[in-house]
Image: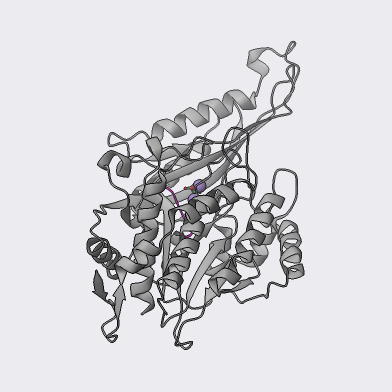
Amino acid sequence: MQSHANHPDNSTTINLSAIATAVNPQRLENDLATVARFGGRTDGGVTRLALDNNDVRARLWLIEQASTLGAKASVDAIGNVFLDVPGSDPRLSPVVTGSHLDSQPTGGKYDGALGVLAGLEALRALKQAGFTPRRSLSLVSWTNEEGARFSPGTSGSAVFCDVRSLDETRQVEDSDGISLGSALDTCLAELDAAGVPRRPLATPMHAFLELHIEQGPILERDGVSVGVVEGIQGVSWFEVTVSGSANHAGTTPRAMRRDALEGACALATALREATRDSEDRVRFTIGKFTVSPGSVNTIPDQVTFSIDLRHPEAATLKNLEATFSKLTQRSWAGCHATLIPLSRVEPVAFPATLTTLLDGTANELGLTAPRLVSGAFHDAIHLAKHCPTAMLFVPCRDGLSHHPDEHIELANAVVGTQLLAASLASLAQ
Ligand code: HGY
Ligand code: MN
Ligand code: MN
């Protein structure tokens, strides 16, 4: 099936079926298995935390793939790794695809990795199909999308898009007191030693497309292989600290206690109650909860817990944030509470120019690709401020993610990669 490039001033046709058939399921499956071994777990999941040794080895592996692509590898000051395939007109800004290689502490093999490897396979397929892009094509792996080790997440794309500063990002520390900056310098030294040149931040892009697993139940329920993502819901992360007084567990009467755990549990329950909505659209999660001094027979004097709050509407997100601020000002079991905002990203809608192009390309490939909004955040949430940006989702079994049992059907990953490759070709002409 021939398609006229979606670019009005270009007469060349793009052979979409040649591109689609050039996508090699075995190559993609091999790459997924290879990358899954970087931090592979016995339960089938991965632990590849941002800038840990497994993440660095996965980056070095990705860089090694540049030569077979005829691409040049480079890395920027926050560690984002790029593979650039030159286009026939170097004056034009590139079309970029990619995602992230870091994982959750007990993550799955596909969150992030599929987007990087589908991008790699798409670029290989385009080369194999004899497609020469006018615009350069780039594959990027963003640093620290998950935010599990260094909070908040999406550091690489946020710094690249100048949404957050490199300096403030470098100062963030993990639970062992290691700063992102020092882990980054170790990673960059390894890439320098491998001869990977540096590149600037915020380089211009014509468009950014990210393929990702849905991490939700919709596409599987609809029985389709791929979906066109039209936006990402807003997300706010907070740290709550409840402070009381430590004392002896055996001798202190209840009336004299300022038990930080009792206060934190009451506050956490009140916050959750404030987010309960009849349409079940608010997402409220307390994922981390630390009690100190953490002794069986000492009344806790401090409890710190995280909040991950999400909603597709900016106004609702704002109202809930205001409610949280009011609730934390109250006294909880005689304890004092503070609410520290860690990060906040407004909901984004992807431009119709790009989502319509994806619809049209899916159509030409004979695919049904329903529209959906992402419940998870992605690096695309920042890229949307940098250039026209959109995403493709492939289904994951039971919608399960951030879990070792995360699973996809290879056939769906191949269809997603075919649509990605064809869409990149259209954009690069
Ligand atoms: O948390 C998220 O939405 C993303 O998967 N890191
Ligand atoms: Mn992800
Ligand atoms: Mn994730």
Image vertical order of residue 413 relative to residue 106, above or below: below
Residue sitting at 56 percent across and 47 percent down?
A: 33
Q: Is residue 250 highlighted in magenta?
A: no
Q: Nearer the viewer, residue 165 or 358?
A: 358
Which residue is at a point 65% across and 45% down the rendered structure image?
Answer: 39
Q: Position of residue 174 (x, y in %)?
A: 69, 47
In what quadrant of the picture does the N terminus appear? bottom left
Q: Is residue 386 visible?
A: no
Which residue occupies 46% across, 34% down?
271
Q: Give the x, y percent position of residue 209.
A: 41, 64
The answer to whether residue 371 is left or right of residue 263 is left
x and y, in percent, of residue 161 in the image: 52, 69
For the record, the magenta segment spans: 375-379
Residue plotted at (75% across, 50% down): 178
Dominant secondary structure of the residues highlighted in magenta in the image:
loop
Look at the image and name its color scheme. Answer: one colour
Closest to the observer, 59 or 282: 59
Task: Give the quadrant of residue 46.
Answer: top right
Q: How many marks?
A: 0
